Amino acid sequence: MLFILAILPDVINLLRVSDAMTLEGYLITKNETNYLIQDEDFDADYANELEANALTWSYHDVYVLDKIPFTFTKFQSGQKINVWHNGTILESNPAKINVLKMEKMN
């Protein structure tokens, strides 16, 4: 029962995904924070060497992925992903998006 209550908000978010906006890019994890990088010159090895605050200086279109819903899929730093979000992008540095769904790309 607790499990169902824990994932219920995420299930509700998944139902809203059809109206959501999507972004495609690369996942980088730094200090337990997940970032989406949308840069054609992305290099996973270089990005993994950088400090978190240096990502925004080194790449264009960097987003903090906030409130990633529960998923059984294991994501790894450097993977190409597709992210559905609610359309609101907070103008922080880096910008922050509320994730509704994430999936790996081939």
Image (tube, rainbow, N blue to C red):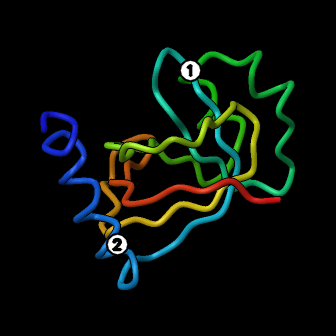
Mark 1 or mark 2, earlier in chain: 1
Label 2 crowding class (10 Å Cα cut-off): few <14, some 14-19, many 20+? few
Contact between labelled residues 2 and 1, with CB atoms less than 8 Å apart: no
**Residue at the front extreme, as displayed:** 1
Foreground pick, 76 / 31 = 76
Q: Is residue 43 left or right of residue 86?
A: right
Q: Residue 105: x, y in percent?
A: 75, 59
Label 1 crowding class (10 Å Cα cut-off): few <14, some 14-19, many 20+? some
Foreground pick, 82 / 14 = 14
Question: In percent of the image, x 74 and y 21: which residue is there?
Answer: 48
Return the residue at label 1: 30
Q: Quadrant of the C terminus?
A: bottom right
Question: In percent of the image, x 19 and y 45: which residue is there?
Answer: 4
The amino acid pointed to by label 2 is: Gly
Identify the image quadrant of residue 97. bottom left
The amino acid pointed to by label 1 is: Lys
Q: Is residue 55 left or right of residue 14?
A: right
Q: Residue 42: x, y in percent?
A: 82, 44
Question: In percent of the image, x 38 and y 75: which residue is there?
Answer: 17
Return the residue at label 2: 87
